[in-house]
Image (cartoon, rainbow, N blue to C red):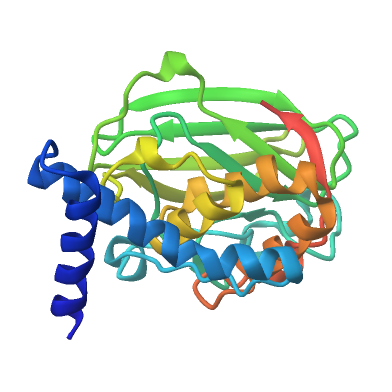
Amino acid sequence: MKFIKRHLQITLIASLLGSNYLPEQISLVHTQYRIKARTNNFVAQAQENDSIGLDFVPRDLTAKDDAPGDRTTKPDYGEEKCSPVEKPLTALVPGFKNDSLRALTSQENPIFWFYVPYNASGLSVEFQLVDYQDEEVYREQFSLTGTPGIIRISLPPTVGLLQLNQDYFWSLTVICNSQQENIYVTGKYQRVIPNFDDISSLTGTPEERLIIYAKDGLWHESLTTILTEIMPLDPQKGKAILTEFLKDPDIDLEELAEEKLTECCS
């Protein structure tokens, strides 16, 4: 039945376009039609209600990650080296409890997001990225401003084009004092090819693009769209969407949805 329905849709599209279009062009139009149809209910809900039931669908590369990192700081390596806090230093990545799982992106220079619970006074953080051969790709220190809150770390264009389908390992370290009593979180990400046919067709609203990213398991695109596009335009809707997103069982970070965004760090 699904095959018959798809065949009828393609036939209708072909008749509307005429004979000047190649079969692969007709197939692309059909794909774009399906993407648009799939987002209609999402957009309608977003307009009517701030809660939209966003569903993040991790790919197997994320869901079956057998070597997780540390998504939060653990008591056994000194959570109180900086100062006592209610919520730990946390990487905003897929995972469960303390474990961070492989995040996926199609972007060449993605943005990383972290919750830093410490008062910014005098503290700095160091972000490091190494490749699958343990070669350092990027390292930079930033002075904290505006924390406690959520910070962003952007990879600059000078990092260059990262290879597809290879793991890159990151760490964020809070430099607590001169005795090197630091705390950190760790994880990895991989640059992949998106599963939708034509990325240039993603010219709709941020909500339309968000649902496509989330259903394709693209973590960095999903979270960054919420925090940098939806929330600045409509904070109430953005906060509701962020809450729905972070409470997904494959993310389990709902408690951070109320934390403020800071201007730190890049």
Query: Does residue 136 show up?
Result: yes
**Is 118 placed left or right of 251 in the picture?**
right
Q: Nearer the viewer, residue 30 or 91?
A: 30
Q: Eyeballing the image, is 105 above or below 89?
A: above
Q: Residue furthest bottom?
A: 1
Q: Position of residue 145 (x, y in %)?
A: 84, 31
Q: Eyeballing the image, is 177 above or below 236?
A: above
In the figure, residue 249 lies in which quadrant? Answer: bottom right
**Is 134 placed left or right of 178 in the picture?**
left
Count numbered badges in the picture.
0
Q: Position of residue 235 (x, y in %)?
A: 83, 51
What residue appears at the point 65 percent right and 47 percent down from the top-left corner?
114
In the figure, residue 216 lies in which quadrant? Answer: bottom left
**Is 96 placed left or right of 243 in the picture?**
left
Q: Nearer the viewer, residue 144 or 113?
A: 113
Q: Nearer the viewer, residue 51 or 65?
A: 51
For the N terminus, the quadrant is bottom left
In the figure, residue 182 lies in which quadrant? Answer: top right
What residue appears at the point 47 percent right and 53 percent down from the top-left corner?
219
Q: Position of residue 115 (x, y in %)?
A: 71, 51
Q: Position of residue 229 (x, y in %)?
A: 67, 41
What residue appears at the point 73 percent right and 60 percent down from the top-left corner?
88
Q: Residue furthest top?
A: 158
Q: Nearer the viewer, residue 240 or 140?
A: 240
